Amino acid sequence: MRQTARNRSRRPGALAGALALAAALTGACGFDPAQSGAARPAAQGTRAASGAPAGGTPRGFDEREFQEDVGTAVTITDDFWRRHWDRLFTGEYDSPRVAGLYDGRDPASAPVCGRERLEPDNAAYCPAGDFVAWDAHLMRSGYARGDAWVYLVISHEWGHAIQNRLRRGLVSPAAELQADCLAGAVLYGSSDDGTLKFEDGDEQELVDAFKVIGDKAPWTKPGDHGSAVQRLRSFSRGGENGVRACFT
Ligand SMILES: [Zn+2]
């Protein structure tokens, strides 16, 4: 995916069908790709002497493009909500803080949420601090599969920040599925708005991403989890029908 000034609308209607036979996974803001053989960082858990970024880097990995995509995902997601908030909700939109990348294996790096440090290999929205953050291993190993990964993770976590800004009655008991729906609404809505361009392979990458994600965030409740099929279906609903479809 990339940032663009050109509008090229893509509809995700085929996505849900593409995953119909995938095995159900228990989930996360579980985004742990290790369970399905994702590429793992070459220098796992150590800071390489060559000056590689904390968290290690998979072989053949373009760190500069990765950093650019993470930045673009944050920008387009925040811009989407700022642009559409007035039409959807009351009050004013305010952005969550972006703690961004952390090394979950290094206690000094992982942000504290309430009284707990964020876990390795996960991504999170922290209601206590109103920030979003993502583990560097998780993001780099997912990105090694394709750039759509970081857009999905970031727009999903942002979805939790949005939920936290709404009346409780609007937040679905299936909070993870609703966050997936909001992620779909943001990515396809940004495509419609002309701020994000889908490239060949992105939609397959999204399908693949849903095969490997789960939800282990400690503040989620039983019933929040969805199977990969349910999660992709929810994402597609937001993508096809927009934000309002995530609240029906
Ligand atoms: Zn989540």
Image (cartoon, rainbow, N blue to C red):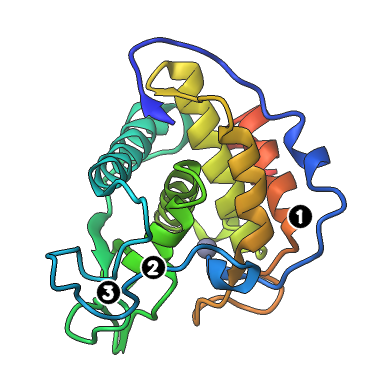
Q: Is residue 97 left or right of residue 8?
A: left
Q: In 3D space, how far apart are the residues under numbered discs 2 and 1 (Cα atoms)?
A: 29 Å
Mark 3 CB near ligand 1 (8 Å cut):
no
Proximity of marks 2 and 3: CB atoms separated by less than 8 Å = no
Quarter in which the N terminus is drawn: top left
Q: Which of the two marks, 2 or 3, is nearer to us in this view? A: 2
Q: Label 2: which residue?
A: 41
**Residue 38 appears anywhere in the view:** yes
Counting from the top left corner in percent of width and height, residue 132 is at: 32, 61
Q: Position of residue 29 (x, y in %)?
A: 52, 67
Secondary structure found at label 1? helix
How far separated are the C-alphas under marks 2 and 3? 12 Å
175 vs 220: above or below: above
Residue 40, compared with residue 63, is above or below; it is: below
Q: Position of residue 197 (x, y in %)?
A: 45, 22
Among numbered discs 1 and 3, the one appearing first in the sequence: 3
Within 8 Å: ligand 1 and the Cβ of disc 1? no
- Give the answer, above or below, for where 42 lies relative to 93: below
Mark 1 lies on residue: 230
Q: Quadrant of the C terminus?
A: top right
**Residue type indicated by callout 1:** Gln
Q: Amino acid at mark 3?
A: Asp
Which is nearer the eye, 51 or 137? 51
Q: Earlier in the sequence, mark 2 or mark 1?
A: 2
Is disc 3 surrounded by few (<14), some (14 to 19) or many (20+) residues within 10 Å?
many
Query: Which residue is pictured at 79% across the width and 40% down the height?
Result: 18
Q: Position of residue 177 (x, y in %)?
A: 65, 56
The residue carrying mark 3 is: 103
Q: Which image quarter: residue 97?
A: bottom left
Residue at left 28%, top 40%? Answer: 65
